[in-house]
Structure formats: C-alpha cells, structure tokens
Image: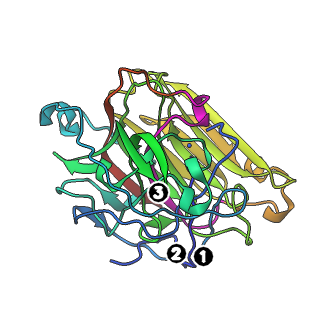
Amino acid sequence: MKGIKSVLIPSTLLIAGALSSCSLRINSSLGSASSNGAASSNAQVSSEAGSASTSSSSENASSAAPSSSSAAASSSSAASSINASSEASEDYVPAGYSLKWSDEFSGTALDSSSWSAQVGDGSDYGITGWGNGEAEDYTADNATVSAGVLHITAVKESTTYNNTNYQYTSARLRTSGKVFKTYGYIEAKIKLPAVKGLWPAFWMLPESNYENRGWPTSGEIDIMENKGRETYKVGGTTHSANSNYGDAYHTGSTTLASSIENWHIYGVEWTDEAIAFSVDGVVYNTVSRDTWVNDCALYEGGPAPFNKPFHLILNLAVGGQYDGYTLPPSSFSSAEMLVDYVRIYQA
C-alpha cells in the first residue's frame, strides 16, 4: 500500500510511549495523527539492538492532519454476526514463536497507545491521493471499536479536504512510533467487504529511511491486499529497490477456500532469510533474501532493507491504481473491513 515515518529505534520489537503490484508506493506513516479513546491492547515489549528505517514516496512523504466526517457503520448486523468468537479460531503460529504484542479490540474505542489515525487526502505531504490515486478522504471517525471488533468503514458522502471535494470517506490506521518490530510472525483475523472499487490492506512500512533514501529503497511488506471485486482472491507483496533504485516488487496471490467476507487469518513470517505470506496457515508466496535484494548495491547482499523495525498499517482505500482506479458502483453507500485481532509473535 503506502506511507512514511522517522525515528531511531534500537529494538526487535518496540512500543514507544506506553499492499501488491502497485508500481507507485508512498510512505506516509510518520507525523502526528491520533486516534480517539483508550481501549484494549496488550503490549509486551522485547528489545534488541537495531536502527530504524523509513519509507516514503519517490523519496519522502509524511502523515496527515485531521478532517471530520460522519461515518456510522452501515452494517447493523447483530454482534453475533460480526463477533469472531462465534467462529472457530485456528492456531497457525509457526513453532518456536511466542506472543509479544496484540490488540484484541475488546474495549469501546481505538487504543491510542498503539494506533494513530492518518487523516486527509495526502496533500499535506505533497502526495494527494496518497501517491496511489485514491479517491477517499481519510478520517478518524471512520474507525470504531465495538463488540470486540475494529470496524474500518468506507462511506459514500460529500466532504472537502484542503479545498478538494471528495465523495468518499474511510480510515487508515498505523502503529508508527508506537508498535514496531524487526522479524517475527505477524497475523490479523479480518473480514473484507466484497465491493468493487474498494482496496483493503494490512501492511507494513519501516520506521525510518534506509541509508537516507525513501521508497522503495527502504522497503514495504504488504501482508494482505484485495481488489473488492475479487471475492476469493488476495495477495501478498514485498517492495524494495532494484539496481537503479526503482521499484522491484515480488508479489503472489492465492484463491481462498471461502469468500473474503468470511473471517480469514492473514499472516507473514519475516526472517533475515525470507518473507513468507500465508492465509489460514497456508503459505502461498515466499520471497527470499536473494530475491528482494534485486542486485541493489546499497543492500550489500541483504538482509537489508528488511532488517530494520517496521510498523503496521490497516486501511480501506476507495479507488486507486491497484485496480485501475475502479470506483464503487452508484448504488454503494458504505462497507466495512472488520478486524478481530492483530498479533505479533517472535522467536
């Protein structure tokens, strides 16, 4: 997907203060956005030496400033129909890993010690459309927590940000500066909306630039991306630089056993030798260190750039180049991306 950040952090997993075949990726995960409330995130930290890295668009980008919008979830399903506890939860954690951090979304508001909301259209950082031609205005109000589930809601409504009119709002959340790690197994249990023109993603960006370069040199890990019209298909991708410092992405996709509208566990096992993408415990794309290095001299054979702390991002984009700038149908009113939990394990 897209984002930026900056910090120097010694840690394999640190908590401070307590997407794809897309050829243009923007890092806008630094900056000041904040989310409301305090909820339930179990934060356990495991420190270790290491420096940070940051991703940005052609070399840099940043976060956004607040914008308001009414975004009540259109889906008024009973708690039993959205609460993942009503469905079996499988244990797909690789052997040798233990839980270091999780957010189970058991409170009534987003946990601001772990998450911040990035807001606006990216124009505050010179990347209108968040560098991907997205059609929404992100707001903090479009992310809510209830019945043990995080709701990220895309809504068709008129709004204006920095003198530009938009017809959609949604939410984009990140753990930048709060929860970031180097290596491990990361997973989230998610239901996706099967709506043409929506682009849900669960992904990672570095905490700071690699060797003073931005994106793609600093790297990006897209744990899960989906084109809303593809009801049974998701993908996982790494982005890094080639020998000319252009974007070299290594992507794979898989067909699910059931619709994206059902609960699935999207995961990635990230080591210094390989990054393996999985759904419900089945690995479908493995990118080796030799592959992600792409003959880029700056990486010196790896494991750079994927040897630095990365943070998490969850967002539901509208439109964008991932699916050829397709927009939702005229009948669209709203749709939700539901997240039961996000967990980080380390060996």
Crowdedness of circle 1 by 10 Å Cα count: few (<14), some, many (20+)? some
Mark with earlier residue (1, 3) = 1
Q: How far is disc 1 from disc 3 in space, using C-alphas?
A: 18 Å
Q: Is residue 328 magenta?
A: no
Marks 1 & 3, CB-CB < 8 Å contact: no
Mark with earlier residue (2, 1) = 2
The residue identified by callout 3 is: 312
The residue identified by callout 1 is: 50
Q: Position of residue 226 (x, y in %)?
A: 50, 32
Q: Position of residue 336 (x, y in %)?
A: 32, 36
* Residue at the image position 67 percent from the left and 44 percent from the top: 287
Give the number of the mark in front: 3 or 2.
Answer: 3
Crowdedness of circle 3 by 10 Å Cα count: few (<14), some, many (20+)? many
Total marks in image: 3
Q: Is residue 314 magenta?
A: yes
Amino acid type assigned to the residue bearing label 3 in the image: Leu
Dot 3: element: strand
Marks 2 & 1, CB-CB < 8 Å contact: yes
* Residue at the image position 49 percent from the left and 53 percent from the top: 163
Q: Tell me how the rendering is colored.
A: rainbow
Q: Position of residue 260 (x, y in %)?
A: 39, 27
| Magenta segment boundaries in residue numbering | 306-326
Tell me: residue 79, above or below residue 256. Answer: below
295 lies left or right of 324? right
Mark with earlier residue (3, 2) = 2
Marks 3 & 2, CB-CB < 8 Å contact: no
The residue positioned farthest toward the front in the image shown? 163
Q: Position of residue 3 (x, y in %)?
A: 56, 57
Dot 1: element: loop
The residue identified by callout 2 is: 11
Amino acid type assigned to the residue bearing label 2 in the image: Ser
